[in-house]
Amino acid sequence: MDQVWNVVGGVSMIIGALLVLLAGIGAVRFDDTYARMHAAAKAPALGILLMAVGVAMTLRTTPAVIEALLIVALQLIAGTVGTHIMGRSVYYVIRPPLDATDELGRDLEAERAAEADSD
């Protein structure tokens, strides 16, 4: 039974590492700024989750499982917040062309109009 846990954990770690590798390749190869940010944020989160599950399945000790859970939680929180902040910074500084409606621009204009009306 231990060998099954080790094999499943090893496969999980390999798949997670491949997802992180694909995210790195996507961050380099994509043309659009937002597509690069998407590649740099989504795939590594799943990859790190799979690697942490693989480590927990391979080691099977309480400290290893707790550490893996903490790593996953911190990655999901920090990755989400960091990507959001980076997206806002890119929007304000570069203003890349968008394929769809600029919802943030619309909301900012409405906010400015409401602020002007209140003054």
Image (cartoon, helix red, strand yellow):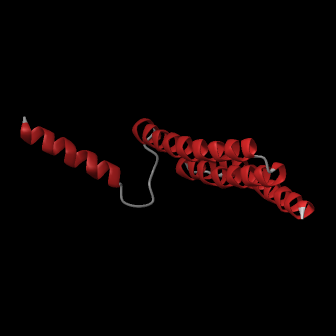
Q: Measuring from the top left, give residue 101's x and y in whole percent.
A: 36, 59
The answer to whether 19 is drawn above or below residue 119 in the figure is: below
Using the image as rendered, state which of residue 88 and residue 82 is in the foreground.
82
Using the image as rendered, state which of residue 56 and residue 77 is in the foreground.
56
Q: Quadrant of the C terminus?
A: top left
Q: Measuring from the top left, give residue 9's x and y in whole percent.
A: 82, 57
Q: Measuring from the top left, give residue 20's x and y in whole percent.
A: 73, 50
Q: Quadrant of the N terminus?
A: bottom right
Q: Measuring from the top left, give residue 29's x and y in whole percent.
A: 69, 50
Q: In the picture, residue 15 is in which quadrant?
A: bottom right
Instruction: Farthest residue to the right: give it.
Output: 3
What residue is shown at x 66% (from left), y 55% (from top)?
A: 46
How many marks on residues? Answer: 0
| Left or right of residue 90: residue 11 | right
Instruction: Farthest residue to the front: give it.
Output: 62
Using the image as rendered, state which of residue 95 and residue 22 is in the foreground.
22
The answer to whether 53 is drawn above or below residue 71 in the figure is: below
Using the image as rendered, state which of residue 43 and residue 101 is in the foreground.
43
What residue is shown at x 60% (from left), y 53% (from top)?
A: 42
What residue is shown at x 23% (from left), y 46% (from top)?
A: 109
